[in-house]
Structures are given as structure tokens and as C-alpha cells.
Image: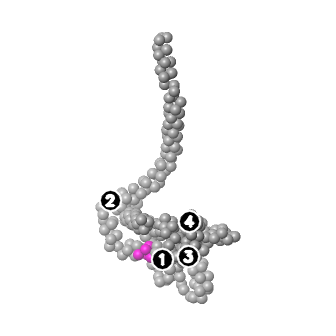
């Protein structure tokens, strides 16, 4: 036993010089591993909830898109019949066209106005913070509240007609209802993109503008050749979010017109198809098509902005 103990002590004496560093690495590795395990365990509830309330419904929609399902009887497999029906459905085509009009009519002007206003508000003037906050107030309001307010503004005797000295039935005419929705939505959405552009402008170093000014560049040239290229990442984010938010439009159309007067957008078409006509399979097919369309549009936008960066 004495010999064994002597040998052990000899071995430890041989290893001792390297032990402090090795023990420290093992301890740090053990702490890192335990932190990873604890982090993974803490993330489990969030992952489970995400799978239950996001992944499963999405997979269920894909599944129902190839079935005929009316909520009261068992789903009946119909293959691609729902998609074939939508290819020839004039009401679906009309809703698709109205959605495109709404996205372009609302978010094109909203992005341009937000960029221009961001340039104007990008100063350190006293009280400018309050002005920026006022532009953001409509964003903080719900779509339903904003729609109720604009229902009064767009009334034939409302504020808009009185301010412009015109007599237009904004919400009860097929020729003007969608324009009324666009005007309201530009007012509501512009502040959201304004904040994003302001954040992008504040990230640009003032030294760059100062150097360009010393080189003789005017305000427009500085904006076109310096500010816009440096804002490209923010612009890409704004463009992608604008398309997604536009395709998600639902509440203003429901509150202001109920989808009448050529204002039925794609989300409202899905809602009516699913819950008023009880054609869940057909509504799921529309949702699948919209998912594919939005994914494709997003990839095209990101690719276009990435190509300009090269």
C-alpha cells in the first residue's frame, strides 16, 4: 500500500505543474455546458408554445388546402381542386387586384413621405423629439380605432370634404372607397417607416456629409449619392415589411366598407370564404398561395437590394 501511495503521489507530482490550467479549462467547460443545458431547458416552453400556436396551425393550413372541409363534416380529399377553382374564380382575382392596389397605393407614398420627413426631422432642434412622437402616435393606435376616426373624417360632411371644398362620397362609391382606404392607411403607416428611416439616418456619421460638403456637393447630391446608398439596408427592411403589412390588411376594410365597393382584399376574401361560406379547404388554399407569393416577393426584394450593394 505504501508503495502504491508513493507511486500515486509521484504521478500527481509529475502532473501538478500542468494541473492549474487544465483544471481551469475543465471547470470553464463544465460551467459552459451547464449554462447551455439550463438555457436549452428555459427555451423549451417558448419552443413548445411556438410549435403549438405557429408551426402546427401553419401545417394544418397546408393540410386542409387539399381537402374540402365545411367545419361540420369530415374533410374530404380533393387534391388540387381548390387551387384549380381559384385559378378560374373571378372574385379571387378581384381580391388579388385590390390587394395589389392597396399595397402599391398605400406603401409607395408612405415610404417616400417617411423618407422625406425623416430628412426634415433629422435635426437637433429643440422640441423635435415631441414632433417625432406626434408622427408616431397613429402607429400606436389600433387599426379599428383609426378606422372609426377616419369614418368620421371621410363622411360626406366630414373634415376632408370641408378642407378640400369638395363633395365626395368616399366610402359609398366604388370609384372612391379604395382611395379613402389608401389615404387613411398612408396616414396610419407613415410614422412606422419614419422611425426606421430616422434610426438609419442617425447611424450615418456627420463627418461623411461634412467631407462631401467640403468637396462641393450640394444637398441633393449628398442625399442621392451618400444618404440613399447608406440607407439601403434600412430601405430593404422597410420595403419587405411594407409588402408584408400590405398583404395583411384586414381591419380597415372590415370597419370602413365591409369589403364592399371594390375594397375586398385577399385577407377579407379568406375570412369570408372560411367563415361565411364555410369553405375551409378553399380558404386554406388561398392562404398557401399567399404564403408562397409573399415568400417569393421577399426573396426578390432582398436579392435586388443585395445586388445593388455589390
Q: Nearer the viewer, mark 2 or mark 1?
A: 1
Tally of numbered tags: 4
Q: Looking at this view, name the residue that lies furthest to the right.
A: 126
Q: CA distance from mark 2 to mark 1?
A: 40 Å
Q: Disc 2 designates what residue?
A: 76
Residue 300 or residue 202, whichever sits in front = 202
Circle nearer the N terminus (4, 3): 4
Q: Nearer the viewer, mark 1 or mark 3?
A: 3
Name the mark on residue 204: 4
Q: Residues within 10 Å of mark 4 (few under 14, many from 20)?
A: some
Q: Disc 1 designates what residue?
A: 105
What colouring does the structure picture have? one colour
Q: Disc 3 designates what residue?
A: 216
Q: Which residues are magenta?
A: 97-101
Q: CA distance from mark 4 to mark 3?
A: 19 Å
Q: Nearer the viewer, mark 3 or mark 2?
A: 3
Main secondary structure found in the magenta portion = helix
Amino acid at each position: 500500500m505504501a508503495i502504491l501511495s508513493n507511486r500515486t503521489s509521484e504521478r500527481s507530482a509529475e502532473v501538478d505543474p500542468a494541473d492549474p490550467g487544465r483544471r481551469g479549462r475543465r471547470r470553464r467547460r463544465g460551467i459552459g455546458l451547464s449554462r447551455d443545458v439550463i438555457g436549452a431547458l428555459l427555451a423549451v416552453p417558448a419552443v413548445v408554445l411556438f410549435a403549438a400556436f405557429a408551426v402546427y396551425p401553419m401545417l394544418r393550413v397546408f393540410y386542409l388546402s387539399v381537402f374540402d372541409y365545411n367545419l361540420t363534416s369530415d374533410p374530404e380529399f380533393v387534391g388540387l381542386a381548390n387551387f384549380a377553382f381559384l385559378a378560374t374564380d373571378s372574385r379571387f382575382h378581384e381580391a388579388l387586384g385590390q390587394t395589389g392596389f392597396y399595397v402599391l397605393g398605400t406603401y409607395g407614398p408612405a415610404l417616400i413621405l417617411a423618407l422625406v420627413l425623416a430628412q426634415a426631422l433629422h435635426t437637433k432642434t429643440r422640441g423635435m423629439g415631441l414632433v417625432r412622437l406626434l408622427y408616431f402616435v397613429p402607429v400606436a393606435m389600433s387599426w379599428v380605432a383609426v378606422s372609426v376616426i377616419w369614418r368620421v373624417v371621410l363622411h360626406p360632411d366630414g373634415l376632408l370634404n370641408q378642407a378640400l371644398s369638395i363633395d365626395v362620397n368616399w366610402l359609398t362609391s366604388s370609384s372612391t372607397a379604395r382611395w379613402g382606404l389608401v389615404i387613411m392607411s398612408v396616414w396610419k403607416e407613415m410614422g412606422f417607416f419614419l422611425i426606421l428611416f430616422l434610426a438609419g439616418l442617425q447611424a450615418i456619421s456627420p463627418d461623411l456629409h461634412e467631407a462631401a460638403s467640403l468637396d462641393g456637393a450640394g444637398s441633393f447630391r449628398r442625399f442621392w449619392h451618400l444618404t440613399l446608398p447608406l440607407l439601403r439596408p434600412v430601405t430593404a427592411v422597410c420595403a419587405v415589411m411594407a409588402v408584408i403589412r400590405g398583404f395583411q390588411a384586414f381591419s380597415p376594410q372590415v370597419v370602413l366598407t365591409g369589403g364592399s365597393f371594390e375594397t375586398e382584399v385577399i385577407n377579407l376574401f379568406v375570412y369570408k370564404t372560411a367563415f361565411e361560406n364555410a369553405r375551409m379547404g378553399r380558404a386554406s388554399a388561398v392562404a398557401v398561395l399567399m404564403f408562397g407569393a409573399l415568400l417569393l416577393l421577399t426573396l426578390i426584394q432582398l436579392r435586388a437590394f443585395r445586388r445593388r450593394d455589390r
